[in-house]
Amino acid sequence: MDLDVIVIGCGVAGLSSARLLQEAGHRVRIWARELPPRTTSNIAAAFWYPYRVFPRDRVDAWARDSYAAFARLVDAPDAGVLPRQALELFPAAASADIDASWSAALPGARPAPADDLPPGYVGGQLFDSFVVETPRYIPWLRARFLAAGGTIEARAVDSPSEALREADAVLHCPGLGARETAGDRAMLPVRGQLVRVENPGISRVIVDEHSGGAITYVVPRSRDVILGGTSDEGDENLEADPATTEAIVARCLALEPRLAGAARLGVLVGIRPCRPEVRVEREELQGGPVIHNYGHGGAGITLSWGCAAEAVSLLGA
Ligand SMILES: Cc1cc2nc3c(=O)[nH]c(=O)nc-3n(C[C@H](O)[C@H](O)[C@H](O)COP(=O)(O)OP(=O)(O)OC[C@H]3O[C@@H](n4cnc5c(N)ncnc54)[C@H](O)[C@@H]3O)c2cc1C
């Protein structure tokens, strides 16, 4: 049965869900308070890596499904999905406690040779990942949705019920906005600051999330490199902090010395929509079903296709 469905939200969760709804034969409209490029999804670094997101068993399945979807998009012209080798580093203090089981089945997964480790690290693993160039990918996704007959309206809602008055079903993808639209008190804003520099010719992603404190990562895109980051719980300040910028650059230089002297192109700040557990769930409201798809924390790109597929399947029509 084809339905009239309104998707709330025009970030990666809303757009991916909207595309899969279209593929399932539904008529789809997106309503969103902010449109790209003014969404968190546009700021994401963004590489495939299940960071700061739970519960682990569901996350692993969603991440795997999305991984397969990104592999299919590598050859799509203009999608901005780049295959990249990733090096995850293990510092001495934390190495015994690290569970790297999520990566065991990934293509290219193997222990990193000692020569690949920057000073101060006792181990690491290599795996094949994807960098999703959000300034290219989000417009590409949006264009595909519009070309398939979808419509996008800049419109804020107070709750999914408001959209249900005009549709058979609602797919609810408001990111951090779930605090207002669903009164969801489990949402936790986690601020991230990034530095964009020129690419001196590097292609490997490097990440250290195990050293305590902030996550550090080097994410090479086609023309620039994103350096991160911070993980400031409860902080929603969108102003860049200059001292933090210097600290990020210094930490990344220690991981990748070829970044020395790379021209700075800008600083980005975004707020991750964290939640103790991602919410992909069906709820029956007066007027019809609402499928929730939000709370993807620091991994909304990584989980996007897997969560969208499950959300659309929950519609069951
Ligand atoms: C610094 C940083 C780095 C990151 N790096 C990565 C990474 O490397 N890999 C990765 O996988 N993820 C990464 N992430 C996480 C990723 O960006 C998020 O998980 C993802 O963007 C969430 O997508 P979303 O569609 O749920 O939310 P958003 O992109 O925030 O979209 C939410 C949409 O809902 C709309 N909305 C909200 N409230 C309302 C309302 N009341 N009415 C109507 N519309 C509403 C908004 O306007 C917007 O259109 C990063 C995030 C940050 C901040």
Image (cartoon, grey):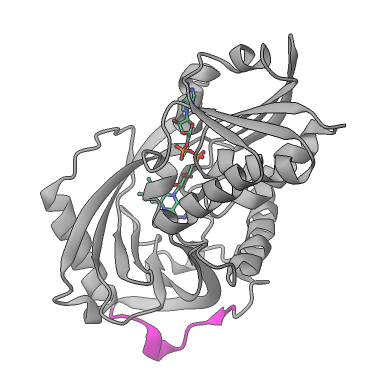
Residue at the (51%, 17%) spot, across then down: 157
Q: Is residue 112 magenta?
A: yes
Q: Nearer the viewer, residue 106 or 287?
A: 287
The answer to whether any part of residue 286 appears in the image is yes
Instruction: Classify residue 121 by image quadrant.
Output: bottom left
Q: Nearer the viewer, residue 91 or 162?
A: 162
Residue 307 vertical position relative to residue 212 in the rendered view, above or below: above
With 18 as the anchor, is 51 left or right in this view? left
Q: Position of residue 103 (x, y in %)?
A: 60, 68
- On the rendered image, what quadrant is the C terminus found in? top right
Instruction: Classify residue 240 by image quadrant.
Output: top left
Q: Position of residue 261 (x, y in %)?
A: 13, 76
Residue 190 vertical position relative to residue 111 in the rendered view, above or below: above
Q: Position of residue 265 (x, y in %)?
A: 19, 61
Residue at the (66%, 61%) spot, across then down: 69
Q: Which residues are magenta?
A: 109-119
The answer to whether any part of residue 55 appears in the image is no
Residue 18 vertical position relative to residue 92 in the rendered view, above or below: above
What residue occupies the far right of the structure in this picture? Answer: 1
- On the rendered image, what quadrant is the N terminus found in? top right
Q: Is residue 81 magenta?
A: no
With 85 as the anchor, is 254 left or right in this view? left
With 24 as the anchor, is 15 left or right in this view? left
